[in-house]
Image: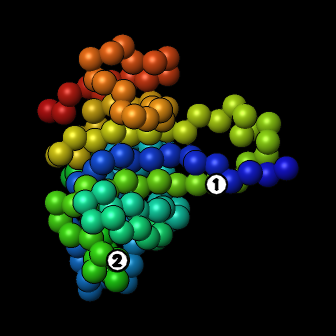
């Protein structure tokens, strides 16, 4: 049996631009996409923590190191610069693969720096002063 599974997520990044004139999509810093395992042109769900809006579009690779998260086209009506958003991808896999699959979760700070990469943390939010579970790593500080 095939199951639809959560694959990767960029958690709590900040929207840097909203471009109504572009045809569509979301442009994201290549470093963020790579860290989350999101491919260019892959479908992404965008959940706006600030406004409560949700939409689906596709990812475009932005300049590496730019920290850009630009909401393009009609979606820019639902999201604005400085909004906090979550970008997530899903895919199908066979049951045996799904049992072994560990999604990649990238946690960002307010500047879209990567502060942590690891599997999904169970809620409520695990306090930062506790040791990280197996499989987590803390990103190197941004220069």
- Going by the image, does 103 lie left or right of 109? right
Q: Residue at x 33, y 15 (%)?
A: 130
Quarter that holds the C terminus: top left
- Determine if residue 27 is in view: no
Q: Secondary structure at mark 2?
A: helix
Within 10 Å of disc 1 (Cα), the crowding (few <14, some 14-19, many 20+) is few
Nearest the eye: 42 or 82: 82
The kind of secondary structure element at disc 1 is strand
Residue at screen point 34% across, 77% down:
75
Write the residue at 49% across / 17% down.
Answer: 134
Is residue 17 among the parts visible in the rendering? yes
Name the residue carrying label 2. 75
- Per the model, the C-alpha gap separating discs 2 and 1 is 22 Å
Between 112 and 51, the residue placed more toward the observer is 51
- Count all numbered tags in the image, as a single digit: 2
Disc number placed over residue 91 in the picture, else none: 1
Q: Would you say 139 lies left or right of 3 here?
A: left
Q: Position of residue 41 (x, y in %)?
A: 50, 65
In the picture shown, does residue 45 fall above or below 12?
Answer: below
Could you tell me residue 57's position as x and y percent?
A: 46, 70
Q: Residues within 10 Å of mark 2 (few under 14, many from 20)?
A: many
Q: Residue at x 79, y 52 (%)?
A: 2
Relative depth, front residue between 122 and 139: 122
Please name whichever residue, 102 or 27, is drawn nearer the observer in this view of the structure: 102
Q: Earlier in the sequence, mark 2 or mark 1?
A: 2
**Residue closest to the far top:** 131
Horizontal relation, residue 42 to residue 68: left or right: right
> Residue 119 at what x, y percent from top left?
49, 32
Residue lying furthest front in this view? Answer: 124
């Amino acid at each position: 049996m095939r199951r639809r599974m959560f694959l990767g997520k960029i958690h709590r990044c900040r929207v840097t631009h909203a471009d109504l004139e572009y045809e569509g999509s979301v442009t994201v810093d290549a470093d963020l996409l790579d860290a989350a395992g999101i491919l260019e042109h892959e479908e992404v769900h965008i959940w706006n923590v600030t406004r409560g809006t949700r939409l689906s579009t596709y990812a475009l690779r932005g300049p590496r190191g730019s920290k850009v998260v630009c909401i393009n086209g009609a979606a820019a009506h639902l999201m604005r610069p400085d909004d906090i958003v979550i970008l997530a991808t899903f895919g199908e896999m066979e049951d045996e693969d799904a049992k072994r699959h560990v999604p990649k979760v990238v946690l960002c700070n307010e500047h879209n720096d990567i502060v942590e990469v690891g599997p999904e943390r169970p809620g409520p939010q695990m306090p930062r002063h506790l040791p990280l579970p197996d499989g987590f790593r803390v990103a190197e500080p941004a220069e």
